[in-house]
């Protein structure tokens, strides 16, 4: 029932956001407003609800390393591919942020629970909070700000200072820092419940935002600049990333249970929150919205394929 409800919610919100814009029911700037709510309210609340009480074990470090490895490889991969195909900087940044990070909680949690049961919950949260979200909050955000600084170099004489200032005023990063401090103290259940309720708005609002921003250009001279990075990014995220993690973790002799979890999480669709960040910063908004929109749909058969291979041959 858990996974079924999520599979219904995904297309409902994506299509709903698209209809709201095409029907001109919401104002044109609604995508920006919804995205701001995700970045300033939903995501920080989700972090504050989970990180302070999360159980950490050194044996689970391999779980948290996986998103960092995929993101690091994506920086080199999309820089090289982008140069080869002559992508502009905004396309390279959008593809790296969206396809270098995965949808490890919203999609990952129900899928892995369906495959392996409730006992995978802690492992998924470690991957998501200390892997994916931390990677977005620090190197991902710095990469985005570095590009913004290059664009505005004439306006700012100190780009490094500008990056640090924006990093330490980025709400999810501040929430993550504060959550480590909160681990030292017991948190009243009433306070945690408030964070959980606010954090629960992340998925539907983020999906509506993505749907609101989704645009598919007509076939023509401009379509290659959209379709090419879209499919190259999805090939990396849905196929190459899980294969690379399998080969790396197999070489490191990681136990089979962790291996299966990390490989499947590596193959999750592009990260919705990273898409929102790209939209907020103006990095190819339509392309950034299409990555999770199309990626979620395409990831369903690829995840079942990897699950079948792992269960039968590992």
Image: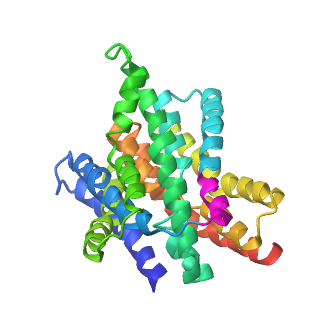
Residue 113 placement (x, y as % from top left) = 55, 79
| Point 28% across, 71% down: residue | 197
| Point 45% across, 67% down: residue | 106
| Magenta-colored stretch includes residue 58 | yes
Q: Where 122 sits versus 132, above or below? A: below
* Quadrant containing the N terminus in the rendered view: bottom left
Q: Where 307 sits versus 248, above or below? A: below
100 vs 120, nearest the viewer: 120
Q: Where 117 sits versus 110, above or below? A: below
Q: Residue furthest front?
A: 184
* Quadrant containing the C terminus in the rendered view: bottom right
In the rendered image, which quarter is residue 44 located in?
bottom left
Residue 244 placement (x, y as % from top left) = 73, 53
| Point 51% across, 72% down: residue | 109
Magenta highlight range = 57-67
Residue 211 placement (x, y as % from top left) = 34, 57
Give the main secondary structure of the magenta stretch. Answer: helix
| Point 23% across, 59% down: residue | 20
């Amino acid at each position: 029932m858990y996974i079924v409800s999520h599979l219904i919610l995904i297309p409902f919100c994506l299509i709903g956001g698209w209809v709201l814009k095409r029907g001109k029911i919401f104002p044109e700037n609604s995508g920006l407003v919804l995205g701001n709510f995700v970045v300033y309210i939903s995501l920080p609340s989700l972090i504050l609800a989970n990180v302070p009480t999360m159980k950490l074990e050194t044996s689970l470090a391999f779980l948290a390393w996986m998103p960092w490895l995929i993101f690091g490889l994506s920086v080199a991969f999309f820089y090289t591919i982008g140069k080869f195909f002559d992508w502009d900087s905004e396309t390279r940044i959008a593809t790296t942020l969206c396809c270098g990070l995965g949808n490890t909680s919203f999609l990952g949690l129900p899928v892995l629970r369906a495959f392996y049961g409730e006992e995978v919950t802690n492992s998924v949260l470690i991957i998501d909070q200390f892997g994916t979200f931390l990677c977005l909050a620090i190197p991902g955000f710095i990469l985005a700000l570095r590009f913004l600084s290059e664009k505005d170099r004439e306006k700012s004489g100190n780009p490094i200072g500008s990056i640090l200032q924006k990093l330490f005023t980025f709400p999810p990063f501040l929430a993550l820092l504060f959550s480590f401090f909160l681990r030292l103290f017991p948190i009243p259940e009433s306070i945690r419940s408030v964070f959980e309720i606010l954090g629960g708005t992340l998925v539907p609002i983020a999906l509506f935002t993505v749907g609101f921003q989704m645009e598919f250009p007509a076939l023509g001279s401009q379509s290659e600049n959209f379709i090419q990075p879209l499919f190259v990014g999805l090939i990396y995220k849905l196929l190459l990333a899980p294969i690379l993690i399998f080969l790396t973790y197999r070489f490191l002799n990681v136990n089979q249970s962790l291996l299966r979890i990390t490989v499947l999480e590596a193959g999750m669709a592009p990260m919705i929150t990273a898409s929102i960040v790209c939209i907020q910063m103006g990095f190819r908004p339509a392309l950034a919205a299409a990555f999770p929109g199309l990626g979620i749909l395409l990831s369903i058969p690829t995840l079942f394929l990897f699950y079948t291979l792992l269960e039968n041959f590992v």
